[in-house]
Amino acid sequence: MLCNPVSYYPEKIDEMTFFQDNDIEKMETIHTYNNLISQGCYNAANDFISKQDGIYGFFADFLNLIENRIYNLQAFLLQKPPKKQPFATFDEEEELPVVDEDTIWI
């Protein structure tokens, strides 16, 4: 499965990644990939599966895609100014807190 692990957020919306079941004819490819993983040959397994067409699964490309989207979203949110708490509550026995006119009382 080849998916683009690059995230373009927030400049544009990332393309959706679709999954489906693998064709029964691709089972030998999946078994070869799983054998490479079980032997600890992660780079060889990734190289092998990246060259295949029509194979779907949670491979390195997909996991890198998710990780990059999370990092870009975090970086975007950290650049935003903090939000003011729009709600205020108080105990009737205490003095009213000082709030501005945009505060919603609950």
Image (spheres, grey):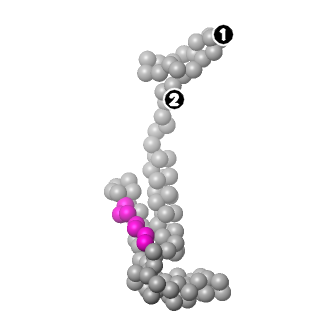
Q: Position of residue 93 (x, y in %)?
A: 66, 10
Q: Main secondary structure of the magenta part?
A: loop
Query: Considering only vertical position in the picture, is 29 above or below 77?
Result: below
How many numbered marks, from 0 up?
2
Return the residue nearer the eye: 79 or 3. Answer: 3
Furthest residue toward front: 24
Q: Quadrant of the N terminus?
A: bottom left
- Which residue bears the numbered disc 2? 85
Residue at 58% over, 12% down: 96
Please give the residue where the numbered disc 1 appears in the rendered image: 93
Residue 48 appears anywhere in the view: no
Question: Over which residues does the magenta segment extend?
Answer: 14-20
Indicate the secondary structure of the residue bearing disc 1: loop
**Residue 64 percent coordinates (x, y):** 50, 69
Q: Is residue 80 visible?
A: yes
Q: Secondary structure at mark 2?
A: loop
Task: Say whether residue 60 is magenta.
Answer: no
Residue type marked 2: Gln
The spot of residue 90 in percent (x, y) is 60, 17
> Mark 1 packing: few (<14 Cα in 10 Å), some, or many (20+)?
few
For marks 1 and 2, give the CA distance: 22 Å
Residue 19, image quadrant: bottom left
Residue shown at 61%/87% (left/top)?
A: 35
**Residue 16 within the segment the image draws in magenta:** yes
Work out whether 46 lies above or below 11.
Answer: below
Between 85 and 35, the one lying in front of the other is 35
